[in-house]
């Protein structure tokens, strides 16, 4: 069955509540718990500042080109979809989003609160490809929407709307962009959106980290979702509008290097590792995630989708456990039938940065990923496909199946959109990467 025929399944819009990182209420919080609670807010705000500058708050920006090695706004970008993005500020009232309907091409428009949780979505999976009018409302709004308008409520006034539209190849960009331009937004009221007052520098700067997080907490009422937990961390100078004392600032300055190092390790330690591949822990992109998982995702995969929409598998080592490096050559064999995904799958190459982030690799053939839409791949006699992972061009026919690597540390990400049940149940195993 063709992929386009598989994109007609329906889903449901949802809003989920959770408690986040489990902690005994009979004991005080630790600074590690405070850090893991705060880090997603910091990353959300750090990236929101760029969106607030252009295209501006409550305005949509369309990027009608695929990500490449120059795309460094967010870590681990995909090379499969064009993006539409809007930073919403809802304290003055809802913002209306109008989505086109599309049943033959995969698309997803997700809405993330300030803690990076996906609280609602429109698209092939969530709404069965149905479009329509939606009001994105903040926690203080108590009005009534017109008939035919669906209301999606966030627990924070700050929301990131991120739309993804599948591109079948370079010749398909114009058609994908035409659909993209049909996604529009408009404020429902005349209230001016509140600007961000504190600029983010870098997470290692403890004073800036606290200032950014405390300002972010002050922008929404502390009564819904994760906002309601902010009071547990006041002893560390963390809370809506708080100014840390000198002792609290010193404590954070001492802790941050260790906290960030542990967080990078947390991102590398997935639910389980099989043949060098890390299988994601359940809860990625959802409000039910632990604070540790939420923070690790914000560091290494900001804006990751929930598992029903997409699954992500990461490899920083080969099947023997040896670290992946562009100094060596590897092969990854895709079994006959490919990866079990109803929409599409792709394997993306990243260079690993020292700060724990990952970016696409500059290369002479401008190939940043391979997948079920990549033209010219040469299969084996049994239908399997050998993908060659190396910095230099392979010889002969192997060059058709080349995914260029960086010269140094690297990471591979396998994405499966609308994963089939066998994949979600972890019964289908990702083949290991073999050194040549």
Image (tube, rainbow, N blue to C red):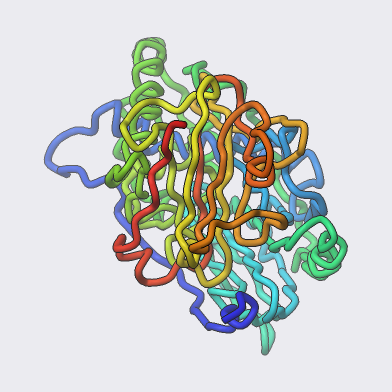
Q: Quadrant of residue 81?
A: bottom right
In the image, 226 versus 143, the foreground residue is 226
Residue 189 lies left or right of residue 205; in this view the side is: right
Q: Is residue 395 above or below residue 228?
A: above
Query: Which residue is painted at 50% across and 79% down in the image?
Result: 11
Using the image, determine if residue 128 lies above or below residue 174. Answer: below
Q: Residue at x 56, y 68 (%)?
A: 121
Quadrant location of residue 177?
A: bottom right
> In the current view of this chain or complex, which residue is farthest to the left?
26
Q: Nearer the viewer, residue 194 or 322?
A: 322
431 or 228, nearer to the observer: 431
Q: Residue furthest bottom?
A: 147
Residue shown at 33% from the left, 25% from the top? 262
Task: Count how many numbered circles sit on residues in the image.
Answer: 0
What is the x, y in percent for residue 85? 71, 53
With 186 as the anchor, is 16 left or right in this view? Answer: left
Q: Position of residue 53 (x, y in %)?
A: 78, 38
The answer to whether residue 358 shows anywhere in this view is: yes
Drawn side of residue 58 relative to residue 171, left or right = left
Q: Quadrant of residue 165?
A: bottom right
Asked if one can make out residue 91 in the rendered structure from this viewpoint, the answer is: no
Relative depth, front residue between 97 and 319:
319
Position in image of residue 375 (x %, y %): 72, 57
Residue drawn at 51 percent across, 19 percent down? 354
Look at the image and tell me in which quarter the N terminus lies: bottom right
Question: Residue 423: percent from the left, percent from the top?
Answer: 37, 64
């Amino acid at each position: 069955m063709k992929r386009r025929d598989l994109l007609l399944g329906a889903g449901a819009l949802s809003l989920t509540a959770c408690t986040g990182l489990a902690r005994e209420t009979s004991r005080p919080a630790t600074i590690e718990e405070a850090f893991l609670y705060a880090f997603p807010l910091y990353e959300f705000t750090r990236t929101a500042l760029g969106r607030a500058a252009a295209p501006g708050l409550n305005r949509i920006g369309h990027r009608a080109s695929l990500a490449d090695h120059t795309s460094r706004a967010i870590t681990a970008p995909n090379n499969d979809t064009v993006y539409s993005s809007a930073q919403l500020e809802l304290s003055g009232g809802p913002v209306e989003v109008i989505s086109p309907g599309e049943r033959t091409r995969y698309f997803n428009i997700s809405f993330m609160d300030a803690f990076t949780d996906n609280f609602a979505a429109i698209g092939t999976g969530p709404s069965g490809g149905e479009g329509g009018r939606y009001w994105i409302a903040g926690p203080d709004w108590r009005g009534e929407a017109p008939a035919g308008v669906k209301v999606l409520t966030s627990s924070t006034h700050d929301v990131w709307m991120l739309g993804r539209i599948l591109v079948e190849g370079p010749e398909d960009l114009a058609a994908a962009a035409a659909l993209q331009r049909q996604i529009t937004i408009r404020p429902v009221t005349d209230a001016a959106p509140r600007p961000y007052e504190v600029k983010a520098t870098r997470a290692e700067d403890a004073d800036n980290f606290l200032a950014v997080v405390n300002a972010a907490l002050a922008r929404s009422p502390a009564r819904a979702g994760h906002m309601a937990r902010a009071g547990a961390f006041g002893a560390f100078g963390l809370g809506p509008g708080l100014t840390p004392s000198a002792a609290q600032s010193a404590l954070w300055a001492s802790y941050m290097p260790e906290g960030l190092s542990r967080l990078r390790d947390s991102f590398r330690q997935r639910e389980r590792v099989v043949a060098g591949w890390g299988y994601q822990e359940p809860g990625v992109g959802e409000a039910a995630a632990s604070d540790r998982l939420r923070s690790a995702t914000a560091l290494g995969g900001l804006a990751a989708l929930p598992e029903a929409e997409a699954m992500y598998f990461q490899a920083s080592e080969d099947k023997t456990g040896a670290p992946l490096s562009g100094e060596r050559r590897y092969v990854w064999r895709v079994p006959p039938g490919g990866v079990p995904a109803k929409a599409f799958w792709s394997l993306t190459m990243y260079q690993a940065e020292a700060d724990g982030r990952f970016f696409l690799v500059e290369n002479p053939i401008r190939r940043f990923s391979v997948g079920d839409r990549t033209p010219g791949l040469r299969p084996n006699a049994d239908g399997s496909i050998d993908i060659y992972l190396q910095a230099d061009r392979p010889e002969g026919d192997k060059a058709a199946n080349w995914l260029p690597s960086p010269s140094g540390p690297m990471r591979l990400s396998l994405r499966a959109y609308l994963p089939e049940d066998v994949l979600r149940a972890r019964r289908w195993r990702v083949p290991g990467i073999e050194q040549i």
